[in-house]
Image: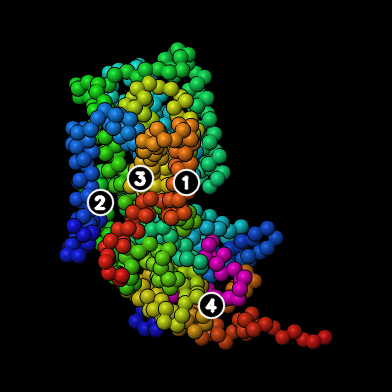
Amino acid sequence: MTNGKSIGDTLLRVDDVSVSFGAVAALTDVSFEIREREILAIIGPNGAGKTTMLNVLNGVYQPDHGTMTFNDRTYTRMRPSEAAEHGIARTFQNVALFRGMTTLDNIFTGRTLKMKSNLFMQAIYWGPAQKVEREHRQAVERIIDFLEIEEIRKVPVGRLPYGLQKRVELGRALAAEPKLLLLDEPMAGMNLEEKEDMCRFILDVNEEFGTTIALIEHDMGVVMDISDRVVVLDYGRKIADGHPDVVRQDSAVIDAYLGVAHDAA
Amino acid sequence: MLYREAGQFKTSYDADMAIFPIAQDRWGMIAIVVIAVVIIPLFTSDYIMGSLMIPFLIWGLSAIGLNILTGYAGQLSLGHGGFMAVGGFAAYNLAVRVPEIPILGTFIIAGLIAAAVGVVFGLPSLRIKGFYLAVTTLAAQFFIEWVFANFPWFTGGTMSMTLDTPSMVVFGYAIESTRDHYLLTLGIVLVLTLAAKNMVRSQLGRAWMAIRDMDVAAEVIGIRPLRTKLTAFAVSSFYAGVAGALYAFAFLKSLDITAYDLFRSFLVLFMIIIGGLGSILGSFLGAAFIILLPIFINVVAHNFSDQIKPDFITNAELMIFGGLIIFFLIVEPFGLARLWMTAKEKLRLWPFPH
């Protein structure tokens, strides 16, 4: 799977990040790193803090303490729009598309930060504004081709089946040409065929664009197949980190998933 | 001619992103503009131009303004009448106090002043959403009405309730007849409608719709919520301000704060709900429904005035109007514009089932 791919230096490092909601500690002193061009899977039982971790990475939640170092710059807090400016894009567990808009427009919104055009030029729709729209339309069409969704280009996404909505959401994240792509359960609720398609797209994105990907997934088959490294969370703590084959043998991980046999007193 | 796309191949993104990508739509628009610019002024009476077309166009413009804010950007507002009042009073004061500015410039500045006021009252929208935002914009409506009713400076130092607007001169041509007023209104409405259509189909419009549909996801993409919402408030209030100025100068020919009361805010909201949220065409359809339909029912009902008692007719008009509102909202809750789109989609395939 990973043949011919060179995993580079650390792209993002998380140091001692803790998040709590009231008395509930969602994450406790979690540290790990994401390296350039790798596919990192974050796994763990329900309520382990996986989605909270992604929300911290792109600024939806602020950590109580701890830092993130992205591209050699250290942050304690980051707003979601700042994360987007630094090149972090993501998808959501429950599809968060703009339902009233077409597939084309949804993917177009992903290019927001790349498009520079002022209000008056857009009102006239002439000269620079039209040129900007045309150039970015080409970029959007490349993504539409890549994800094989040409025929639903002008369909409002609210009318699309779930699997295709997930694919459009991936397209919207890709449109930003991110350095780091965060995928929150990209294959949840899909049938086998849709899962295989999605795996193929994720691997293609990683190989063709060299995009670093961090994903949360419950399907262990998928995780073991496509990821280069796995981070395991349980009750907000990191319990394992390493190559899929190593993590699979780890006793703490097996305990977390299967439960620990307590000695009967 | 059948409404078909067959044989129209788009060979460039420009062609696909044109304002009316389908040829039949283009011809339809040209026909409507020709009728509005040539046929109506040449062949219809002052009554049709002055009492039907001018208010229809002005309320259509105002409805576009509210549709940008509520239909596209998803921010509910009940202060639209207030922002129209700002435009009307700003234009009056500019025209009276600084008569050197040409009247078109006066309208634009009045719109900008309304936009500035709209931005101020749009600030709470970052924290407040939905019905609660509607209540804060209601405060804008009451506050603006109160200011203009209680500070005589805005009404030229007199305590008179109604003021005549000064006469208008456009590029050396005095606007006097009803036809002149109609053409001036039509020109401004056409330009601003085109601008609105362009805004909603480019990056700005997509940002507005993204905020409306899913604000968290929009922020994650890099759309700044406050800036996007305030732009919507500014553009919306600009349209309200110009419409308010036109309402005073081209239709009422007088300035009176009661012409911009809360009832008008509701009226514009009804227009965009019945016409279609998030549709420029819907703004005009809604304005036609609210402004022209009662007049039409009235005219039809009076044909029966020798057979039925007049007080019954007056009540029947209101009942028929109310009944039609309910009928159209049941048939298509997303408004007349959606009804029109569905009809077009069916027409593309008609008479074949698939």
- Residue at image point 35% right, 33% down: B55
Residue B276: say if magenta.
Answer: no
Identify the chain of the residue marked 4, using the numbered disc in the image: A
Secondary element at image label 2: loop
Nearest to the eye among marks 2 and 1: give it. Answer: 1
CA–CA distance in space, label 4 to label 2: 45 Å
Residues shaded magenta: A39-56
Q: How many marks?
A: 4
Q: Which one is nearer the viewer's eye here, A38 or B334?
A: B334
Q: Quadrant of the N terminus of chain A?
A: bottom left
Q: Which residue in the protein does label 4 denote?
A: A218
Q: Position of residue B96 (x, y in %)?
A: 34, 17
Nearest to the eye among marks 1 and 4: give it. Answer: 1
Q: Check if mark 2's residue and mark 1's residue have beta carbons within 8 Å.
A: no
Both labels 4 and 3 in a single chain: no
Q: Earlier in the sequence, mark 3 or mark 1?
A: 3
Q: Which residue in the protein does label 3 denote?
A: B285
Q: Position of residue A122 (x, y in %)?
A: 29, 46
Above or below, A252 relative to B353: below
Q: Earlier in the sequence, mark 2 or mark 3?
A: 2
Nearest to the eye among marks 4 and 2: give it. Answer: 2
Q: Which residue in the protein does label 2 denote?
A: B19
Q: Position of residue B247 (x, y in %)?
A: 36, 29
CA–CA distance in space, label 3 to label 1: 17 Å
Q: Amino acid at mark 3?
A: Leu
Q: Which residue in the protein does label 1 denote?
A: B323
Identify the chain of the residue marked 2, using the numbered disc in the image: B
On the rendered structure, is A198 left or right of B216? Answer: left
Q: Check if mark 2's residue and mark 3's residue have beta carbons within 8 Å.
A: no
